[in-house]
Each structure stands twice: as C-alpha cells, then as structure tokens.
Image: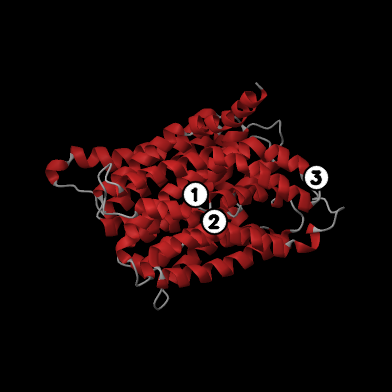
C-alpha cells in the first residue's frame, strides 16, 4: 500500500506538468510536424539553427531579470499597481541593446559563423525582434504566475503557437490556388508575427492593470534608459554572463553543424532530434522543479554542500519516471525500423535522438543544482564553473562537428551535463569537504 501511495505521489506532479502544458505542447508538436514535412530538408535545418539563435538572443537580453522581479515581489502583491516600480521591468533594455550590437558585430565579421543568415534578411529581423520581445514575455509570464492570472498565462503559452499553426497550415491551404507554399522565408514571417502577438499581450496586460500605469510605462522608459544604463548593466552583469555561459553551447549546436564540412546532409535529422531532446528536457525539468524544488532549497540551509549533492542526485532519479519510458519508446521505434516491422525511413533522426538522450539524467541533476546555486552567495564560484564548462564544451563541439559530424556533436550534447557537474566539483572543491559549510540562503 505504501509503495502504491509513493508511486502515486511521484507521478501526480508529472501528470500536472503534462496536463497544464498539454495544449501548448500539442500545438508546438503540430508546428514541428508541419515544418519537418513541408519544408525542404536544408530549409528546415537552417530554420532550426536560426530559431535557436533567436531564443539565445532573447535569453541573453532577459539576463535573469524575470526571476529577480518575481522573487522581489511582495507575497501580498498580485499586480503591478503598488508592488514593484516600472523601472525594474525596464532593466532588461541595456542588455537587449548589448545583445543586438553583439549579434550585428558577429554577423558582419569576415568568415562569420553566422554567414548562412546573411542571404535572408528576415532571419536577422526575427532574431533582433526576439531580443526585445522575449524579455517582455518572460517578465509578463512571471507576473501572471505570481498574480495567479490563468487567462494571461494561457494566452502567453498557447496564443503564439495557435497563430503559428494558422499561418503555417490554414493560410497555405486557403490560398493554395495562388501556389503559396511553405518556404523558409514564409516560416520566418509567421514566427515574427507570432512574436508580435506576444508584444500585444504585454501591452494588453499593462492596460488591463490601469491606463495610468500604461502612461507611466511610456513616460519612464526613456528617462530610465538614459539615467541608469551604466548602473543597470553593472548591477546585473553576472546574470547576463551566466545566461551567456549556460545557454550558448546548446543553442549554437545547429550552427556548428551547418558550418562544418562533414555530414551536412544530416542537418535536418540532427535538427529534429535536437527539437525532440528539448521537449523531453523541458517536461522533465519542470516536473523536477515542481516536485523537489522547495525541499531541496530547505535542505540547502541546513546541510553541507557535499551531503546536499547526494540529496540532489537522489531526487533527480525521479526524472526517470518520464525519461526512461521516452527512451524505451524511441529505442523500440528505432528497433522496429531496423527489423522492418514498420517502414524504415531514410533518416537517422531516431539514432541521433537516442545518443542525445544519454545525457538526460545528469541534465536533471544540473537542473536541481541550479535551483540551489542561484541562491548562493558564491557567485564567483558559480561563474568559474560555468566558464570551465563553456570553454571545454565549445572546444569539443568544434572538434566533434569537424571530425565526426552530427553523431559526434550529439555525443558532445549528451556529455555536456556531465562536464557541467565536473566543473562544479572543481569550482566548489574548497567547500565540498567542509562538514560545517552549509549553503547560506
């Protein structure tokens, strides 16, 4: 009876994650199906690489400020009316400007790794728009969660994907007599319009919270940017650097493969496997955070770092309730193709997915460790650990993509979480063996 109750207790949060995001995930998968079946393989691979860069640019611009705003809100505050100054929201603007300038600089370098984007100006427009709108999305989502505004949260989660399905599926069918096919450029336009919808949602949120607040937002934007640009960048530089070190290696993986001279024909297969891996990691990570975040953060105030690490590893095993069935399903599907039980497709997507999935459990450990380390006062150690992992993984990705192509790059993605854990062990080694060294919240 107790074992049955324990299993039920572990599976309920997983069911909660799946049910709360099932509609958005369904539309996301439908969009991916439309793209992978209707775009040409080179166009699909190029779009995935472009989209991952757009997401990276958006995360760099946000610089962790959505989490700061959420944690600083008083528990009694459900809206922006009195709980937080509008200027705090605008702190992301300097990082957005820096990110835009950095992107344009790299794009215009001689032999730039982003040269494959130069032939399509729409790609750069989409990426640069993300640098401004993605932070607004993250901030609005955080405020909606704190205020328990379910309608706003659902609009942010589902609205853009509904629009993308309509633009990618319904519009080409409705205008089929005009030979409106799905192209790389049209896909970029569709995603850009859906990003614009996010901006409209944010403006609606401001107006909903009071027209005077909307006027305050408009009037203080320029004043804040001019008066506090330098201070804002300096105060939040660690969050910007952390996003750069954490997000860049994974986001740049498709670009590494496109710039390699080996296995270019596998770019579409690698891209789809990359998308599947992102889905698995996203659902598993949210499950772990909902199930174990509060407990781990409590233990971090009373346990030394070494003992806490073993608790994290034990808690991360619960992710196997989701990861292991997914891995077995992909493996069985791959075996069925090999033995001709089902039609075999001339694509190594499943084999590449299996290689990448080898790193899901250590990735779960890293997810929970981040919950703790984000509360540490030892930010220098944290930055040092991620810098070590960043340098090593970028070097390995360059070597693997050049010599072993897609499979080598997939293997590097699989061991990336292990490298991160090793870098933490090096950076935090002075604190691991001190029995009285508890993590201070």
Give the Cα separation between the discs numbered 3 and 1.
33 Å
Give the Cα separation between the discs numbered 2 and 3.
31 Å
Q: Are marks 2 and 3 in contact (CB under 8 Å)?
A: no
Q: Secondary structure at mark 2?
A: helix
Q: 366 or 84, which lies in front?
A: 366
Please, is residue 122 above or below residue 9 in the view? below
Q: Quadrant of residue 92?
A: bottom right
Give the number of the disc on residue 301.
3
Q: Which residue lies under the disc numbered 1?
A: 134
Q: Which residue lies under the disc numbered 2?
A: 61
Q: Residues within 10 Å of mark 2 (few under 14, many from 20)?
A: many
Q: Are marks 1 and 2 in contact (CB under 8 Å)?
A: yes
| Residue 209 shows in this picture | yes
Q: x%, y% of residue 50?
A: 39, 58
Q: x%, y% of residue 76?
A: 71, 30
Q: Nearer the viewer, mark 3 or mark 1?
A: 3
Q: Nearer the viewer, mark 2 or mark 3?
A: 3
Q: x%, y% of residue 365?
A: 63, 49
């Amino acid at each position: 009876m107790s074992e049955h109750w324990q299993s039920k207790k572990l599976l309920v949060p997983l069911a909660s994650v799946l049910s709360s995001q099932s509609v958005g995930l369904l539309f996301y998968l439908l969009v991916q199906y439309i793209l992978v079946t209707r775009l040409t393989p080179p166009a699909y691979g190029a779009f995935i690489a472009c989209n991952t860069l757009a997401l990276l640019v958006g995360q760099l611009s946000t610089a962790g400020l959505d989490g700061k705003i959420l944690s600083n809100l008083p528990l009694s505050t459900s809206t922006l009316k009195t709980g937080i100054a509008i200027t705090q929201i605008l702190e992301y603007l300097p990082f957005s400007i820096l990110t835009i300038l950095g992107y344009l600089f790299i794009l215009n370098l001689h032999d730039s790794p982003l040269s494959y984007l130069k032939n399509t100006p729409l790609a750069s427009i989409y990426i640069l728009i993300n640098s401004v709108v993605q932070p607004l999305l993250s901030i609005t989502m955080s405020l909606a969660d704190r205020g328990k505004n379910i309608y706003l949260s659902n609009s942010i989660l589902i609205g853009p994907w509904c629009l993308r399905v309509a633009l990618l599926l319904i519009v080409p069918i409705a205008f089929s007599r005009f030979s409106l096919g799905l192209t790389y450029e049209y896909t970029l336009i569709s995603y850009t319009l859906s990003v614009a919808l996010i901006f409209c949602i944010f403006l609606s949120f401001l107006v909903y919270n009071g027209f005077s607040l909307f006027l305050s937002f408009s009037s203080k934007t320029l004043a804040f940017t001019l008066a506090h640009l330098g201070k804002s960048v300096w105060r939040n530089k660690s969050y910007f650097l952390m996003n750069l070190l954490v997000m860049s290696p994974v986001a740049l993986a498709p670009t590494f493969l496109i710039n390699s001279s080996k296995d270019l024909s596998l770019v579409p297969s690698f891209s789809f496997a990359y998308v599947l891996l992102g889905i698995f990691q996203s659902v598993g990570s949210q499950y772990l955070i909902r199930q174990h975040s509060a407990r781990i953060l409590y233990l971090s105030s009373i346990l030394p770092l070494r003992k806490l690490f073993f608790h994290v590893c034990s808690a991360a095993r619960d992710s196997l309730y989701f990861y292991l069935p997914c891995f077995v399903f992909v493996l069985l599907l791959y075996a069925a193709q090999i033995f001709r039980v089902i039609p075999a497709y001339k694509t190594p997507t499943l084999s590449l997915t299996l290689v990448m999935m080898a790193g899901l459990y250590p990735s779960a450990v890293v997810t929970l460790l981040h919950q703790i380390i984000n509360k540490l006062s030892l930010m220098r150690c944290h930055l040092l650990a991620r810098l070590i992992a960043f340098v090593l993984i970028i070097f390995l990705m360059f070597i693997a993509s050049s010599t072993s192509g897609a499979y080598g790059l997939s293997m590097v993605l699989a061991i990336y979480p292990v490298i991160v854990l090793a870098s933490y062990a090096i950076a935090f080694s002075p604190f691991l063996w001190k029995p009285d060294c508890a993590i201070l919240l």
